[in-house]
Image (cartoon, helix red, strand yellow):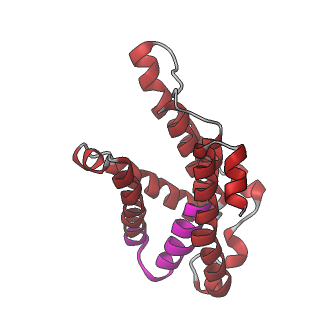
């Protein structure tokens, strides 16, 4: 009942974003939260420490280094090609909500739960690489739906997703705070929407 009523007052793109956010919360974040809550004492970073201290997250210098690198990665090619920064004509402010919730939900699952469990049992390099492969594979359905799967695989764009996963994993392990990779992930996604 609620969704049809919402549909009358907002655009279909906005409605799709709302559906995606709600589904990610229900299917990803809620189960991850309960698993971390139940088994968090047996993970690499204890459940009492995983959210960390917000001050600790914002004082983690490597986060700012990656924010600068992410910004340069998106801005420098535009400046080089056209001498100016070009915003995506398809950008909508609703996409910021998608980026923030993707950062929260995906990081709770991939770093907060999966990586955190794997680091307790395996060497860090194996845990990071396994997590990067899983993170890559979760993007396959989106790429298939958007018709870009073959392109991303043949021009090696998929490596970018794995490198990002490794960055998110390293910053999570070093900061011992899920807030850091959440911020980095959301920031990267926002840049992708704004400058695509």
> What quarter of the picture does the N terminus occupy?
bottom right
Rendered location of residue 95, percent (x, y)? 60, 43
* Residue at the extreme left of the image, as rendered: 154
| 14 w.r.t. 137: above or below | above
Q: Is residue 195 visible in the rendered structure shown here?
A: yes
Residue at 61% of width from left, 77% of height from top? 31
Residue numbers of the magenta segment:
103-127
As drawn, 35 above or below 95: below
Q: Main secondary structure of the magenta part?
A: helix
Place of residue 27 in the rendered image (x, y in percent of width and height, measured from the top left): 57, 71
Query: Residue 110's x, y, as percent?
Result: 51, 67
Please tell me whether residue 28 is drawn above or below residue 68 in the rendered image: below
Residue 111 counted in the magenta span:
yes
Q: Residue at x 57, y 55 (%)?
A: 102
* Residue 183 appears in the rendering: no
Q: Nearer the viewer, residue 164 or 147?
A: 147
The image quadrant of residue 187 is top right
Q: Report the residue that reaches farthest toward the top.
A: 83
Compared across the picture, whether 79 is left or right of 126 comes to right
**Residue 123 included in the magenta stretch of the image:** yes
Numbered marks: total: 0
How far across and how far down the image is residue 14, in percent?
63, 45
- Is 161 or 17 nearer to us in this picture? 17
């Amino acid at each position: 009942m609620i969704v049809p009523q919402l549909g009358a007052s907002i655009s279909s793109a906005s409605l799709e974003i709302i559906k995606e956010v709600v589904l990610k919360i229900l299917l990803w974040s809620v189960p991850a939260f309960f698993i971390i809550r139940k088994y968090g004492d047996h993970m690499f970073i204890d459940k009492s420490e995983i959210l960390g201290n917000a001050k600790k997250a914002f004082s983690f210098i490597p986060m700012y280094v990656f924010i600068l690198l992410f910004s340069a990665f998106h801005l420098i090619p535009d400046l080089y090609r056209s001498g100016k920064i070009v915003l995506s004509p398809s950008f909508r402010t609703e996409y910021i909500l998608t980026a923030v919730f993707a950062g929260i939900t995906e990081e709770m699952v991939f770093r907060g739960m999966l990586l955190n469990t794997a680091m307790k049992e395996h060497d860090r390099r194996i845990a990071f690489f396994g997590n990067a492969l899983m993170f890559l594979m979760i993007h396959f359905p989106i790429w298939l739906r958007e018709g870009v799967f073959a392109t991303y695989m043949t021009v090696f764009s998929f490596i970018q997703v794995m490198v990002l996963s490794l960055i998110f994993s390293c910053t999570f392990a070093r900061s011992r705070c899920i807030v850091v990779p959440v911020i980095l992930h959301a920031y990267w996604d926002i840049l992708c929407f704004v400058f695509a």
